[in-house]
Image (cartoon, rainbow, N blue to C red):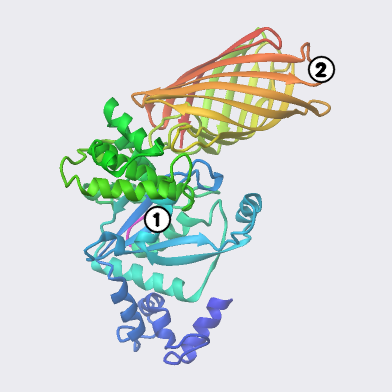
Amino acid sequence: MEYLALIKAFSENPNQAWGHFQYPLRCVFPERLKFLQAQGLFKDLTSDDCEELNKWKAGLNAQSLSVVFSSSYPNNPSSMFGHTLIRLRGEAKSDLLDYSVAFSAWQDVTESGFFMAVKGLVGGYRGLVEISKYYQKVNEYNFYESRDLIEYPLMATNEERERFLNHLWEIYQTTYFDYYFMDENCSSLLFQLLKVTYQDKDLGPHKRAYYLPQELVESLYESKLIDESKLTVRHSLKKTFEIKFNSLTPNEKLDFFKIIEVQNLEANALENLATKSLETAVDFFYYQKARTKGQLETAPVDQAKRLHQTLVARSKKGQSPAFLVDYQKENVTYPHQAHKPRMLGLSVGENQKSSYVSLSYKPGLHYFTDSPLGYEKFQSFDLFATELSWKKKESKIFLQNFTLIDLRSLHSWSFYDPQLSWMVNIFHNDDLYSKRQEASIGGGLAKKFEQFLVGGFLAPFVALEDKSYLGGRTVLLATGSIAHQWSWLIENNFRVLHKKLEQKPKQSWNELTLESDYHLESNLSLGFKVMHSTLWDDQAWKLKMNWRY
């Protein structure tokens, strides 16, 4: 209705200011004016002489456009899928002085994370288009949230770039949108903005009830609008430190730990340490400063003072030797390589000495044994995973498995980033001989190695069969991949209930599972799963084929 009122006011007084706008409406909606003129309306009007619009465009100095994908932030559920923004590339000497365009929720930072998540799901926030200096986004994502920034340059004609800026001006100046975490989010609005920009090209439809940041990149890739020769990666401050630290020799690492741990270290002693150790220590202190929001530690070393001393010592070394690190050769998570989020699966197996055939479906998103390409390693996020089975012996179709949520973030514990891993799991399991409904939430520790990760969790849980029973659960797991084709998971769950369930023969039991998938391509895999449970002294196995779409 508001838009219709604007059109009515526009048609009646096209050259007058209206409402809070300080210039004619024909300048407020330049791209809409072009659209209406294409329909034969307002042929006598032009927005070319709109001084405010021209000044605004000149200030942005957008010579070209890029979509920037920010990798996932594992310790925040709302950021586990990544984020996107658009960079307006100019001719500045420093690329950090370019402008960026993002769509985000206008949040109250004093609210708890739980209420932020709920309000984000139900549209409780206003979503605003934000235009800011690119260095502000680099600080936010690269430094404070340890996220890599992957830049996809767009191929756009002058006409398409002008169309983008005109439409951006319209929505930036005049309106806001309700923000929905699932489908009206940071990426879906940019997708709609780019659909207007590339109106002569088919970017594809909005395919699901949710919209993922990687879907924006995939749409542009499939439409051949990305200039792959100019694709770049800006590693996070944490990743930069890790790369440098891992390249140090054993003696250089000894020097590094002297810098960050030895309290009474004289200035001349610092100058005698290895240059690479000094550079790595500087990155370490900068990362700690970003991670702690500026609250550097004072013991055992006053880190703020030691950072200054290290910078002085490094400056006296001159420019040589320099770090010879090829950042582009480091493993990078490219979102356009990711598998599709939805899955259909067909499997055959046996449990409780009875064979079955099952059909499974889940709307999203990623499991440990899925193709690792395009996703941050060692994260799993499954929603509404459903498995319907037919058992030959009983000639019956039944709901064998239903997972409401299985969310696990395995954050690797390290001396420079000591954070816990965490998990949330709610599921139903029925093999016709016993039923299990369980909800658990817990935390633990994990350690990442080159190709795999090991971790453990402690989690209280509630068993919901017939009555509610409290229990404890320990989880030990190892997961990894080989050459991006074989993905595997070994998981051991030990459960203890404070009271014996009536239909269960034991108060405590153990489950050991081995699962692996071979990826014929990112969206098609063959795999198996074997399990032993002491609950019924039962062994189960399954052969499966999964297709992502």
Residue 510: image quadrant is top right
- The residue beneath circle 1 is 139
Helix, strand or loop for disc 1: helix
Prevalent SS, magenta region: loop
Look at label 1 and name its amino acid. Answer: Asn
| Residue drawn where x is 47% and y is 61% of the image | 103
Query: Does the magenta run of residues contain 178?
Result: no
| The N terminus, quarter of image | bottom right
- The residue beneath circle 2 is 500
The one of 55 and 329 positioned closer to us in this rendering: 329
The one of 315 and 414 positioned closer to us in this rendering: 315
Task: State which region is magenta.
Answer: 199-203
Tell me: 56 left or right of 301: left
Q: Is residue 7 visible?
A: yes
Q: Position of residue 409 (x, y in %)?
A: 53, 35
Query: Does the magenta run of residues contain 200?
Result: yes
